[in-house]
Image (spheres, grey):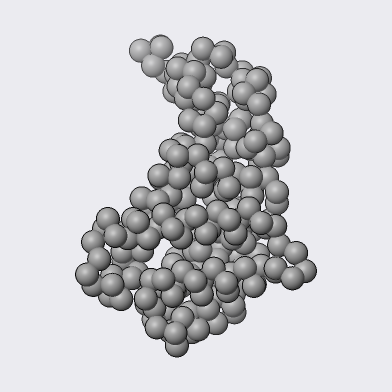
């Protein structure tokens, strides 16, 4: 019984340390040795629970994405169709990568590493099927999964490219939504209505709220301090 308790406690400490370090230093710049020191666990305990740093990221991304999607639903609660929710979720992800370079690093890595990318693909496939099956009635789940692979590639590219005076966040969101909604067979007039709806939202402000909500949720679960 004691061994089981120690393993659970070590996992809690590792996840707590990783949330703090990833946000402070970025995923890429955080070393396993720093995680071990911050979490006060041995290398053997870390490897038994997560094996690698990527294993920690996989667990955190699963939690973050489920909370992220839940946090943005109120923004599109009164919208005419689920397409608006998809658009808001997409825009918020792009906005969050502009809040800090460390968040950009976490998201780009999440869309790159196969295990975390698969979590994103599966979750987004369900979103696509719910939002766009009316436009693509002949498409099965596997079809939406294949479409998600394409849109995820665009998303990663847009996340990785930092905004500048020309390629602003607003322009980035409009470009991405225009291409993705077109590929998903949303009529031109409706596409413009959806993009206009998203443009009325202060995405950076909402992104900060979503990040705060995710951190608050993780703080309760993992007893984060500061």
Image coordinates of residue 200 in percent, x first then y, are 59, 79
Task: Name which residue lies at 37% across and 76% down.
Answer: 185
Residue in the foreground of this view, choosing between 131 and 60: 131
User: Would residue 130 be found to the left or right of residue 191 on screen?
Assistant: left
The image quadrant that residue 114 belongs to is: top left
**Please, is residue 102 above or below residue 32 in the view?**
below
User: Would residue 158 be found to the left or right of residue 90 on screen?
Assistant: right
Task: Name which residue lies at 70% across and 39% down.
Answer: 24
The image quadrant that residue 157 belongs to is: bottom right
Q: Hey, which residue is sitting farthest right in the picture?
A: 165
In this rendering, the count of numbered labels is 0
Task: Name which residue lies at 71% across and 37% down.
Answer: 25
Residue in the foreground of this view, choosing between 58 and 121: 121
Residue in the foreground of this view, choosing between 215 and 185: 185
Image coordinates of residue 130 in percent, x first then y, are 31, 66
Image quarter of the C terminus: top right
Image coordinates of residue 199 in percent, x first then y, are 59, 77
Task: Name which residue lies at 50% across and 84% down.
Answer: 192
**Please, is residue 44 above or below residue 183 in the view?**
above
Is residue 213 visible to us here?
Answer: no
Image quarter of the N terminus: top left
User: Would residue 108 be found to the left or right of residue 65 on screen?
Assistant: right
Is residue 129 visible to us here?
Answer: yes
The image quadrant that residue 163 belongs to is: bottom right
Q: Hey, which residue is sitting farthest bottom in the picture?
A: 189
User: Would residue 19 be found to the left or right of residue 50 on screen?
Assistant: right
Image coordinates of residue 141 in percent, x first then y, are 26, 58
């Amino acid at each position: 019984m004691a061994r089981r308790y120690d393993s659970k406690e070590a996992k809690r400490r590792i996840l707590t340390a990783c949330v703090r370090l990833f946000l402070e230093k970025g995923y890429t710049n955080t070393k396993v040795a720093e995680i071990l020191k911050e979490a006060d666990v041995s290398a053997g305990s870390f490897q038994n629970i997560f094996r690698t740093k990527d294993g920690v990221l996989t667990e955190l991304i699963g939690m973050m994405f489920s909370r992220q999607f839940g946090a943005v639903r109120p923004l599109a609660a009164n919208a005419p169709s689920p397409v608006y929710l998809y658009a808001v979720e997409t825009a918020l992800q792009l906005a969050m990568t502009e809040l800090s370079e460390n968040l950009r690093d976490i998201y780009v890595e999440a869309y790159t590493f196969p295990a975390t990318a698969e979590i994103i693909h599966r979750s987004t496939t369900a979103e696509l099927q719910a939002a766009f099956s009316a436009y693509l009635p002949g498409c099965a789940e596997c079809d939406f999964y294949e479409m998600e692979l394409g849109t995820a590639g665009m998303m990663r590219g847009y996340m990785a490219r930092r905004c500048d005076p020309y390629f602003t966040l607003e322009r980035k969101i409009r470009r991405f939504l225009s291409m993705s909604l077109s590929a998903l067979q949303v009529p031109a007039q409706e596409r413009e209505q959806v993009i206009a709806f998203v443009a009325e939202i202060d995405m950076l402000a909402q992104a900060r709220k979503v990040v705060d909500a995710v951190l608050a949720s993780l703080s309760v679960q993992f007893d984060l301090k500061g």
